[in-house]
Image: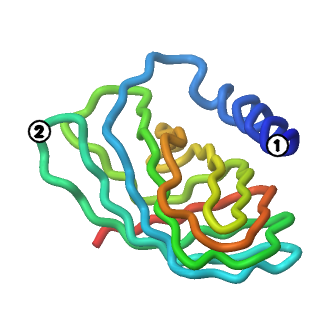
Amino acid sequence: MRLFTIALSLSAIVIQPALAASEHFVAGSLECDLSPSKGAILGSRQDVDCVFHPSQSAPPVGYSGSIDNFGVDIGEVEKATLIWEVDAVSRQASYDLEGTYRGLEAAAAVGIGGGAVLLTGGTHGTLSLQPVAVIGKQGLEISLGVTRLSLKAL
């Protein structure tokens, strides 16, 4: 638990300067289903299928991609769903989430578990993904390190 708290604090320090100079708007939420994975001591890779639910009255947008973890990632995850609040630095008619996001992760599961992955990136680095929930994370895993999420519109 202490490692989780430290990682979450470091994530806030890393991401805050990128978004500190302006107002923030909740653009919507991003829900991603992760493929099963086996972690290696130095990292792992998982495919993701995501749906962006805009805050404005607009249809959901599908994305596919991958999450790469670099650091301690030991164990196996059978399934998991990650949900992020998508924060933007400006209001727009629509938001394109395609791109690469980077940040820090801390997670653990023994049977059922949870964690947090705080990311920033996207179009010109103007979006941040704030963790809201981890649903149905099942497996035996501990993970702490740097995370990269790559998204491509369907």
Element at label 2: loop
Q: Nearer the viewer, mark 2 or mark 1?
A: 1
Depth check: 142 or 59 in front? Answer: 142
Task: Give residue 1's mark.
Answer: 1
68 horizontally vs 3: left or right: left
128 horizontally vs 111: left or right: left
- From the image, tell me which residue sits under label 2: 57
Depth check: 126 or 149 in front? Answer: 149
For residue 118, what is the image quadrant?
top right
Report the residue at 59% width, 69% height from top: 138
Up-down relation of residue 83 to residue 111 (above or below): above
Residue 140 in the image, given as x and y percentages of width and height: 72, 72
Report the residue at 60% width, 20% height from top: 20
* Colouring style: rainbow
Report the residue at 80% width, 42% height from top: 7
Residue 76 in the image, given as x and y percentages of width and height: 70, 79
Report the residue at 68% width, 26% height from top: 17
